[in-house]
Structure formats: C-alpha cells, structure tokens
Image (cartoon, rainbow, N blue to C red):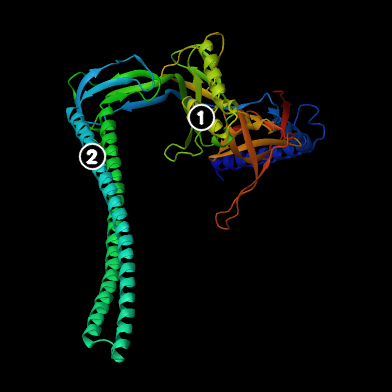
C-alpha cells in the first residue's frame, strides 16, 4: 500500500470516530435532568411550558354596555332649503306692463307682483257681459209669453163653461120639441089636427136635436182648445227655464272671462321674499299651459327653513320624529343648532340607498316666534269659540287654513325655534347653506353596544373576537349601525343557506361577553391570551 493510500484510510477512520463521539455526547446531554437548572439543554416538559408562555398575548378587552348615555348617531351632509318655494308663471299670454316687486322685496299672500297687458281678455269680458244682457232680455220675453199663455188658458176655460151652458139650453129646447112632437102626433092620429102641423113639429124637434148635438161638439172643441193653451203654457214655462239656464251659462262665461283677466296679474301664493326675477317691462310672456313659458318670478318663504339630509339605509329604520338633530353649518363656524326630526320619507332610494330626513326650524327672532306660536294655538282652538255646529265648523275650517300655511300638512308639528349653543339669538339660515347634521338614534337605549374598534372584518365579513377561558373565539356578527364610535351588532348563531333557503339566525349580546378591542388581525381562533379589561 502506498503512503498516500494509507494516509487517506487513516483520515477516514479518524472522521468516523469524531462523528460517533459527537452523537454520544448529544444523547447524554439530552437525557440529563439537571440541564434546565444549570443553563444547559431543557427537558421537554420545561420547553413546552416556556413555549406556551411566549405565545400567550396580552390584549385589551371590553364588555358590551347598556347605558342611556350611550347614543349611536349618524352624521351626513345637509342642505338648507326654504320652507316654501314657487316659480311663478303667467297663466295668460301678454306683454309685461308693470313689475311691482324685485329681488329681495318681501311679499304678502295675494299681493300683485306682475301686471300683464291683455286687451283681448278685456274685450272678451265686455262681450260676455253683453251676452248676459241679451239672455236676460230673452228671459223677460219668455216671462211675458208665459203670462199670455196663462191668460189664454183662463179664457178657454171660460169658453168651456159657456159652451156647457149653451149645451144645456139646447138640450132643454130639444126635450121640449120632442114632447110637442109627440102630442101633435097623437092629435093627428085622432083626426084633431092636420098632418102638415105634425110635420112642422117634427122639423122643429129635429132642429132642436141637432142644435143640442152641436152644443155638445162645441164643448168638446172648447176643451181641446183649452188643452192646447195649457200645453202652450207649459211650453212657455219650459222656455223660461231654458232662458234662465242660458242666463246662468252666460254668467259663468263672464266669470271665466273675468278670472282669465285676473290672471293678467301674477299674485303671491304665500308670504315670502322674491329671490329671482326674469322679466322686465315690455317682455312678452307665454301662457303656462302651452308648456313653453319660463318663470317670471321665484319667491321663497325663509322665516321657516327646512334642513335636509340623507340617512344611510342601515340607520334609516331607527329614525323617528323624536330623533334629536344636531346641526353645524359651514357658513356659521362654531355655531351648533339643535332640533328634532320633523318628517322623514319611509322610502329608501335605490340609486343611493338613502332616506330623506327633514327638520323644520323657525328662522327668525324669539319675539316673533312667540307671536307665531300664539297665532297657531289660536287657530287650533278656534272651533271652541262657537256654540253652534255651523259656527264651529266655520271656525275650524278657518283655523285649519291658518295652521296649514305654517306647516306642510295637518299632521306636522309646528316648526321649532332652534336651540343654539352659546348664542341667545338664533342665527339667520339662508337657503343654499350646507353643513353636517348628526342624528342621535335613541332606539338603542335598551341594547348592548360596543366601541366601533371592537368590530373588524376578515374576508369581507364582520367579526368580534371573544375571549372564553383565556382563549379567543371568532364571532360572526351582523352590524346594524356603526357610527365610528359605537356599534350595535347581533351575533350570527346559524349561517343561512341559499340552497335550502334557511335564513341566518341572530342573537343579541348579553353584556357578559369579553370582546377584544385591538390587535384582532394578529390573532386567530383558539389562541391563548391574557386579558386586560378596560372600563369605557
């Protein structure tokens, strides 16, 4: 064997011995029970205990709380709108003759604002009044004809009585002639008189008989004539009714022409102020019914304003008329206005998934508001001031009209005077202002709430991380409302199934849960934690 080959064999043997020695030493050290105490290799039991202590994480947790002082709110953009606003258009075509009010001028309900020159309507009114005179004259003629027909009926009734008397006389003569004719016939049979005399008596009898028949026919003719005159009387009476109707129609036409002429003056439909003007003297304006007219003036009522916001669909079910509204307007920095919801639309718009909410506020001084409230109260109590049913009805109707001019409907409350932080006189709000409105949803006073940071998402779904027996558990939840500070959730106890159609099953929080408040993304199901319970 060469020297080189011997050297290789020797080195290989030495390396094998080194490896074997290393394995033996490691085995001995691993089996030694004193290693953990002397800083050497730990026993498996001590290693497992140390590893568990390293994995245990300290977290901050809270318990759900039910407290009247906890209020979930929703904050959204608002806009200020006038209580009433109307674009006034002409209802007749014409040239503007006079403009009484300009932008910024106050107006009263019924006050004329713009006058149009409409000579054709003035002429039409004159023609309608002339037609009335004509119809009234025709009616007078009809009354005269009715009087004449009535007189003719009376005349023919007298003629009937006359004909009856003549018939009675003719009957008496005929009876007398019949008796003479019978006596003379007997005398002639006995030879007492000549036959010629009998023939004369027969002629007189027949003449009297025909005279009686003629008198009877005269009665029937007089009766027919009287019936004809009575028919003429009824025709005359019907003609009077027709003429009276024609007079009423002519008056209605005249009234319509008068109304159309009154439309030549554009009037204010309510108390307010002019905010836009688009015509001057000499401007030709179209009739609004043509669909081509433009607004002449725009008036708005600003002593009451409506604050409008859009509430997200998840908060919409919890809005009521008692919901408190806190308003901050961009143009009035530092001013906080408080009020209550006046009305809301029970309809979530599909295009933006929001519900319209309105708050009406009185927009003038407290002194004027006192008068405003007193007038409204008097309108409500007006019906009690009368003892009669008719008077009560009239007063109630008048009071309702007064009330309705200050509210949008009979069910609306009277607009409130806003409560303004730090100011004794409410600031003037102008339509078009913007800002934010916060609604305090009072429906959650009896529900358990959590800080918003306790809710987190995983895989696009909301969860809570609950601690039980020192171990974390994921709770899938349905978030009803989350305003960024507080959240109202329900725990999903059973997932729904689209296949079977089973719905999700929820339960409310009990208040005994321990919910981790932070670092949820770092933890998983079943992880041991050490809890620091925080009061909130």
Q: Quadrant of residue 526?
A: top right
Q: Which residue is depicted at the point 27% across and 60% down?
A: 228
Gap in Å between the C-alphas at discs 1 and 2? 44 Å
Q: Can you tell which of label 1 and label 2 is closer to the viewer?
A: 2
In the rendering, at what x and y percent does residue 209 appear?
A: 28, 76
Q: Which residue is more in the foreground, 253 or 39? A: 253
| Disc 2 crowd, CA 10 A, few/some/many (<14, 14-19, 20+) | some
Reading the image, the residue beneath label 2 is 137
Task: Judge whether 427 appears above or below 497 on screen.
Answer: above
In the image: residue 424, left or right of residue 505 = left
In the rendering, at what x and y percent does residue 249 appear?
A: 28, 42
Task: Judge whether 1 appears above or below 199 on screen.
Answer: above
Please indicate, yes or no, whether residue 139 appears anywhere in the rendered image: yes
Q: In which quarter of the image is residue 107?
A: top left
Reading the image, the residue beneath label 1 is 400
Q: Which residue is depicted at the point 28% across and 64% down?
A: 224
| Disc 1 crowd, CA 10 A, few/some/many (<14, 14-19, 20+) | some
């Amino acid at each position: 064997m060469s020297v080189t080959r011997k050297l290789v064999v020797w080195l290989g043997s030495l390396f094998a011995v080194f490896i074997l020695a290393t394995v033996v030493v490691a085995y001995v050290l691993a089996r030694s029970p004193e290693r953990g105490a002397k800083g050497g290799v730990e026993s498996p039991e001590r290693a497992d205990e140390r590893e568990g202590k390293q994995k245990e994480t300290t977290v901050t947790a809270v318990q759900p709380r039910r407290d009247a002082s906890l209020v979930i709110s929703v904050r959204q953009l608002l806009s200020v709108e006038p209580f009433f606003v109307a674009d006034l258009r002409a209802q007749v075509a014409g040239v503007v003759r006079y403009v009484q009010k300009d932008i910024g001028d106050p107006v009263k309900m019924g006050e004329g604002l713009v006058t149009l020159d409409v000579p054709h309507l003035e002429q039409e009114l004159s023609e309608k009044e002339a037609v009335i005179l004509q119809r009234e004259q025709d009616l007078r003629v009809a009354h005269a004809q009715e009087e004449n027909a009535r007189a003719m009926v009376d005349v023919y009734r007298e003629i009937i009585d006359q004909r009856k008397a003549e018939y009675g006389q003719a009957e008496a003569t005929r009876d007398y002639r019949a008796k003479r004719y019978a006596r003379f016939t007997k005398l002639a049979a006995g030879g007492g008189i000549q036959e010629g005399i009998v023939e004369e008596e027969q002629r007189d009898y027949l003449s009297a008989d025909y005279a009686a028949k003629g008198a009877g026919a005269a009665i029937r003719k007089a009766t027919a004539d009287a019936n004809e005159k009575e028919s003429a009387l009824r025709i005359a009476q019907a003609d009077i009714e027709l003429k009276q109707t024609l007079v009423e129609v002519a008056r209605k036409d005249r009234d319509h022409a008068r109304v159309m002429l009154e439309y030549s003056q554009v009037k204010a439909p309510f108390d307010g102020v002019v905010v836009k003007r688009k015509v001057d003297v000499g401007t030709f304006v179209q009739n609004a019914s043509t669909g081509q007219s433009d607004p002449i003036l725009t008036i708005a009522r600003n002593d009451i304003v409506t604050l409008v916001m859009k509430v997200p669909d998840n908060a919409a079910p919890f809005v009521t008329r008692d919901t408190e509204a806190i308003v901050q307007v961009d143009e009035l920095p530092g001013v906080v206005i408080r009020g209550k919801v006046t009305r809301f639309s029970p309809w979530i718009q599909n295009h933006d998934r929001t519900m319209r909410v309105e708050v009406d506020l009185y927009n003038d001084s407290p002194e004027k508001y006192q008068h405003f409230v007193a007038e409204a109260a008097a309108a409500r109590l007006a019906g009690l001031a009368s003892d009669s049913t008719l008077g009560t009805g009239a007063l109630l109707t008048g009071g309702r009209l007064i009330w309705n001019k200050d509210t949008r409907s009979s069910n609306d409350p009277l607009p409130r005077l806003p409560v303004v932080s730090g100011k004794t006189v409410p600031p003037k709000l102008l339509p078009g202002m913007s800002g934010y409105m916060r609604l305090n949803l009072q429906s959650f006073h009896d529900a358990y709430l959590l800080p918003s940071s306790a809710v987190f998402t995983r895989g696009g779904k909301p969860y809570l991380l609950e601690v039980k027996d020192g171990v974390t558990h994921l709770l899938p939840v349905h978030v009803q409302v989350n305003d960024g500070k507080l959240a109202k959730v329900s725990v999903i106890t059973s997932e729904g199934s689209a296949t079977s159609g089973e719905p999700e099953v929820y339960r409310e929080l009990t208040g005994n849960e321990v919910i981790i408040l932070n670092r949820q993304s770092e933890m998983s199901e079943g992880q041991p934690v050490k809890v620091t319970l925080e009061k909130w």
